[in-house]
Amino acid sequence: MKIFSFVFFISFLTYSLPLLAQENTEEKISSNGVYSDVNFALGIYPEGVSPAIAYSRLYPIAFKKRFYIGYGVRFTSYFGRDIELVTAPASVSEGNFFKPQNEEKLDTLLMPTAQTNSLNATIFLMYKFSKKFSVGFNIDAIGFSFGKDRESTFYSFSEGIPATTSNASVTNFNLLLTGDYDIGSLNSELYAHYDVSKKIALRGGAAFLFTEYTTDQKFAFDNDRFRKKSLGLMLSVAYKL
């Protein structure tokens, strides 16, 4: 996942965008306040949906205590239909943060339905432009996934192998390594955040989800890992603790 691009985007906002509102002295953000919440989110994608619940705790560290960084945990489920997963490992796809994938080595795994669940430790970033308005980014770092095995069909466009039916299971271990080096199912969000009250905030933005399955046999290039990359709309409600 392109974590560095997102971090650069957040940093760019902190330098280039003006404050959205002028506040009275008594309304200014606390210089040492810790931000903590429970967040309920829904990712909406062309081929499915992904509800998630997360706990986060963030600390102000820079830019006059407006830039926050923190940690937390997130549980994400994914429900998809008629999805196409492609060759996952960077050692095969040859794709990474600086280099596009080699499409000639990408094979496809077709799955009528998919359902995965993941529990991951998550990194959180936030910048407060005013008392009520913020922008944020978060990304899963490490954890595990589970779900029922699925029947799938493998198609190889690289080696001309006939379509083959295979059993696929959810890749159990998740690890953020950036781009095609990532392992397993990982969720990330980039969003705008608005406080509607002292306890409730609304968020809207983009969600980027990796969903990965491992087949019970190896196919072209000795590969058994296949990944779905989903980019969609994210809507959420946060309850501040």
Image (spheres, rainbow, N blue to C red):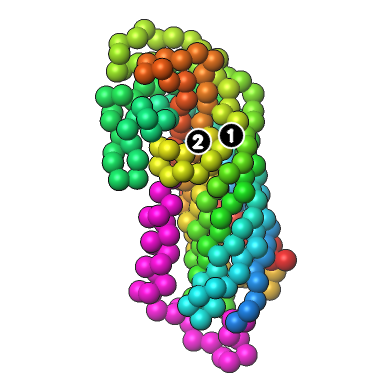
- What residue did someone put label 2 on? 183
Q: Is residue 35 above or below residue 130?
A: above
Q: Position of residue 87 (x, y in %)?
A: 40, 26
Identify the residue at image location x=63%, y=79%: 32
Q: Residue furthest top?
A: 162
Determine the residue positioned at 33% across, 36% down: 95
Q: CA distance from mark 1 to mark 2?
A: 7 Å
Magenta residue check for 211: no
Q: Quadrant of residue 86?
A: top left
Closer-to-camera residue (19/33): 33
Quadrant where the C terminus sits is bottom right
Observer able to see residue 212: yes
Vertical placement of 1 versus 110: above or below? below
Q: Residue at x 53, y 45 (%)?
A: 187
* Magenta region: 1-30
Type of amino acid under label 2:
Ile
Q: Position of residue 240 (x, y in %)?
A: 69, 66
Quadrant of res 105: top left
- Residue 76 in view: no
Identify residue for label 1: 173
Point out the residue furthest to the right here. Answer: 241
Residues at marks 1 and 2 touching, judged by CB atoms closer than 8 Å: yes
| Residue 149, horizontal then vertical, whole percent | 61, 20
In percent of width and height, residue 153 lies at 46, 15
The secondary element bearing badge 2 is classed as loop
